[in-house]
Amino acid sequence: MGMLDGKVAVITGGASGIGAESVRLFAREGAKVVSADVDETGGSRVAAEASAAGGEVVFQRTDVSQAAEVQALIDGAVERWSGLDAVFSNAGIFFRTGGLADCSEEEFDKTIATNLRGTFFCMRAAIPHMIKRGGGSIIATSSVAAEFGLPLSAAYAASKAGIGGLVRVGAVEYGKHLIRMNAIQPGLIVSAQSLADPRLQAATREEQVAIFEEAQPIPRAGQPLDIAQTAAWLASDLSTFVTGQEIIVDGGLLPDPGLG
């Protein structure tokens, strides 16, 4: 018996990294999953793999920066499986092209549109369905960048800090409907996005992972599954008294992660 048996979940950013691992884990734990991403090839592949392993997963191409597409995603999940129990708003982008004064309006706006507006759209679309359902869990991927000044991340840090505000307000406003809202703040996680950091490009993949391993008290690099497990717990009935929180999952990462 899985901890998500009988639950209907939507996961954005499901084509790779944390999102893909979450799709697989939620399905293994018994959830019916709608996975979403702009990467149709990757998203379809992950959904097919999870289904072949015995899960119930479908993929729907979705650009989370577009309100109508997010609404269609959420409404489609409800129509397919007659309800909605969990949304993991995980889709995000990260540009590192220079300091704050070098950040273009285009880069800033695109980052906010995907990371923050995308989370807002997921919340707004899900809340009415969860009220009808009698409760639910909304989870968003934030970042430890929201907590300390990570260089070359002005737009990203601003978007992730904004997510904290959304979950705290949402938790207060909708707690009476048994809707919980929480954010996860990953630290250094081994993924295509994190390893693409331009400050790591001179290193081999093994050297990159070693840098991550040395950056926190727990001497191993963070993995997408570390975040997926936290998301699954927040989506489950094991966390029904947890809301309005930003849960740091970073192996004890120090304020200076050595990537400044």
Image (cartoon, rainbow, N blue to C red):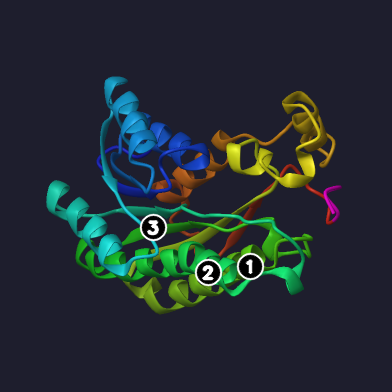
Q: Residue furthest top?
A: 53
Note whether 204 is above or below 167 in the view shown: above
Whether the residues at callouts 1 and 3 have beta carbons within 8 Å, the answer is: no
Regarding mark 2 in the picture, which secondary structure is present there? Answer: helix
- Rendered location of residue 124, percent (x, y): 33, 71
Residue linked to disc 2: 112
**Location of mark 3 (residue):** 137
Residue 200 part of the magenta segment = no
Q: CA distance from mark 1 to mark 3?
A: 27 Å
- Sort mark 3 into few (<14), some (14-19) or many (20+) by Cα contacts within 10 Å: many
Q: Are marks 3 and 2 in contact (CB under 8 Å)?
A: no
Do the residues bearing badges 1 and 2 touch, measured as CB atoms within 8 Å?
A: yes
Amino acid under label 1? Ala
Viewer-nearest of discs 1 and 3: 1
Determine which quarter of the picture holds residue 119: bottom left
SS type, badge 3:
strand
Q: Is residue 222 above or below residue 98?
A: above
Which residue is located at x 77 percent, y 32 percent? 208
What's the amino acid at mark 2?
Answer: Ile
